[in-house]
Amino acid sequence: MLRKVATTGVDLESVYAQTLERIKGQKKDRSRLGMEVLMWISHAERPLTIDELRHALAVEPGSTDLDPENICPRDILLRSCLGLVVVDQEGSIARLIHYTVQEYLRLPNILPGAHKTLALTCLAYLNYDQVKRLPINKSPSSLRDVPFLQYCSLHWGFHAKEGLSDGVISLAVDLLSEYDNHISASLLFNQIRLHGVLFEADPLFSGLHCASYFGIVEVVEALIESTGCDVNSQDCMGFTPLMWAADKENEGVVKLLLARDDVDSNNPDNSGATPLWWASWNGRHAMVRLLLANGNVDPNKMNTSGGTPLAVASECGEVGIVKLLLARNDINPDKPDNDGVTPLLWASMCVHEEVVRLLLARGDVNPDRSNHDGQTLLMLACSRKHEGVVRLLLAKRNFNPDQPEKSEQRPLWLACFTGDEGTVGRLLARGNVNPDELDNNGVTPLWWACFRGHEGVVRLLLARGDVNPDKPDIKGRTPLWRASRNGHDVVVRLLLGRDDVNPNNPDSNGRTPLWMAAEAGCVEIVRLLLGRGNVNPDERDKWGQTPLASASRCGNEEVVRLLLARDVVDPDEPDEAGETPLLRASEFGHEGVVRLLLASGKVNPDKQNEDGRTPLLWACDQIHEGVVRLLLARDDVSLDKPDNLGITPLWWASCRGHEGMVRLLLARGSVNSSTPNKQGQSPLDVASRGGYMKIVALLQSQTTAIPSEE
């Protein structure tokens, strides 16, 4: 019973019944029109536009073409429904005034035979000569003259299935007998095609494919009997009628086709997939059961990628289908695809633990089998933190938990990398797992745990007596080095608590854990390392750069402050390129670091690198006005000192077009605004060439310029 209107308590069913009686009481044509409009709007598969509705109502059974004079004007159509139908102005969609109207109209006996009428109308329209003459490749956007065509093409089968009659079957066979060249085949196929690919092959889709897709058993039977069509024919994707019926779970059609001796149930599509493969992929349990009951089905047939029905069911976690397939005596449960991936590996990769359990319970599945990259089931489970799968595997006696992949990485490495403490503990508990084994890069499980900062895993490994906590990789990077670089202070603390860890061990570039922590700005780790009496805070790498230089270059002020507090640190020590910490900080514009270095009283603010560049010149070149101000506040900074190319700070400020820095430099009376570089270009020349006219005016206002050499 429909709900009552809350404010009045009126029974809506009675209201709508009375309205329908009024509609039926109109003049004959108006009465018929009103009821047909309500029938279409209430039983259509999707909302109809007003133009689609007008054309639907203009179809005459038995006619060969649409008579334009039958197309009803919009206002008459609406008036015939006595206010029950409105038109959405934005989309021109014809709608009922309230959803309860549709509920009422779909009650039994209100509009009996609605789907039959809709099916006959759609099929009559599709069989019109005007429609059959349309080219099959005509684009949907160019079908304005036949607005009802799209709806008929996509939905006639639904109405036919719901309202089947001899007349419907006859019209459907008429349509489908010439379906290969009918535009509705193109419209339907490109609506339901797989993977969104647009197909334009000829033919796209046969009548038998269409009937199988809609699942109309009687039409399939009639079509085969009347036309003698090929029951194994393939559409442009290689799909057979059986494949379409199974994909849409049309059980009646599947049974009909499988009962025929001439139907090949193993016929693959263009990708090599069989009906059983697709049913397994899409989780069609009933279809898989029907197909397997057919004695001719090959349950191991692979697609072009080598995947079997069991493999795709395992990948998708279809437990019921996996059980059905495994119940077959002729199933191969360990068959790999072209990449060496077995059903068991697929189930593990996709975290389907119950499928893994089913496969491992069989004696003919090898749990140690690897794919072409050397990855075993255990490795995949460890890399994805699938503890349930790991437990299942480690419970098997004849199982190798230490089998490596091509890079020599093993399950323990991956568990340490992901931080899976439970799996690490279980693997370490096995007597046949080496906790200190190296991979091809010389990396140990502990190294990976330190790299990722997995404190719990680090504790498990350090608690063992057979793990070297200071073992470097092939580039000399120790676990402490890695943890320091990545900012894992808790792990660093654990490692520094060991007597067998050398905190000064450098990598192949001569960079120590302190050097790396200083570069990364890991203040707490720098404190921890400096707190050790045996850490050299001024250790140079192979390019002569110190931790202070690294921190200064990166602008890590707090680290610079900590290092400057150490007496053994020389804040003015140049590297092999002559770059001091102050030069680096000035180059990159780190004002806070520049301020700290200048305040230390231990740096020469005018020191040049091997190219003759001073901190002031670097700051002007890189347009760091704040650093320029800090340096100009010093009495021991030369404003006119050129580099090896004869370029001065003023030259760079003029070249860069930075008026503010030019003013700062010119405000010091000791600056020569006309000093040329070694190519004879003065600050005035480069400012003029750059179009910086305000700077040109500033420079020209100074004392008479020294002529530049052309």
Image (spheres, helix red, strand yellow):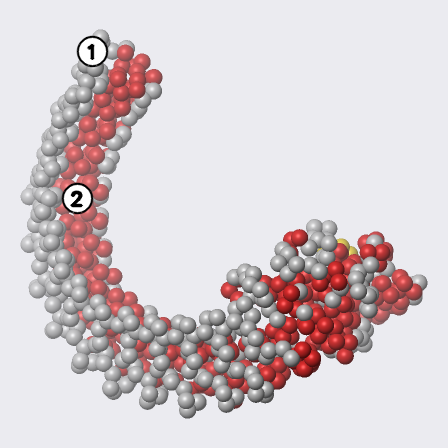
Closer to the camera, 137 or 483?
137
Identify the residue position indicated by label 1 in the image. 707
| Residue located 76% across and 78% down the image | 165
Q: Position of residue 703 (x, y in %)?
A: 22, 9
Residue 688: where, in percent of width, then height? 30, 17
Q: Residue furthest front?
A: 228
> Which residue type carries mark 1?
Pro
The mark found on residue 372 in the picture is none
Q: Which circle's residue, 2 or 1, is located before the other in the chain?
A: 2
**Residue placed under numbered mark 2 in the picture:** 550
Task: Report helix, strand or loop for mark 1.
Answer: loop
Is 557 placed above or below 693 here? below
Measure the alpha-carbon separation of dots 2 and 1: 43 Å
Specify whether residue 639 is in view.
Answer: no
Left or right of 659 on screen, residue 432? left
Image check: 619 left or right of 154? left
Rendered-image quadrant of the N terminus: bottom right
* Label 1: few (<14), some (14–19) or many (≥20) C-alpha neighbours in 10 Å: few
Quadrant assignment for the C terminus: top left
Residue sitting at 20 percent across and 54 percent down?
Answer: 485
* Direction from residue 6 to residue 614 in the image, left or right: left
Please give the name of the residue rendered at 37% of the width and 84% of the height, measured from the top-left corner: 333
Query: Which amino acid, mark 2?
Result: Ser
Is label 2 in a helix, a strand or a loop? helix
Tell me where residue 574 appears, x and y as whole percent. 9, 37
Q: Is residue 74 visible?
A: yes
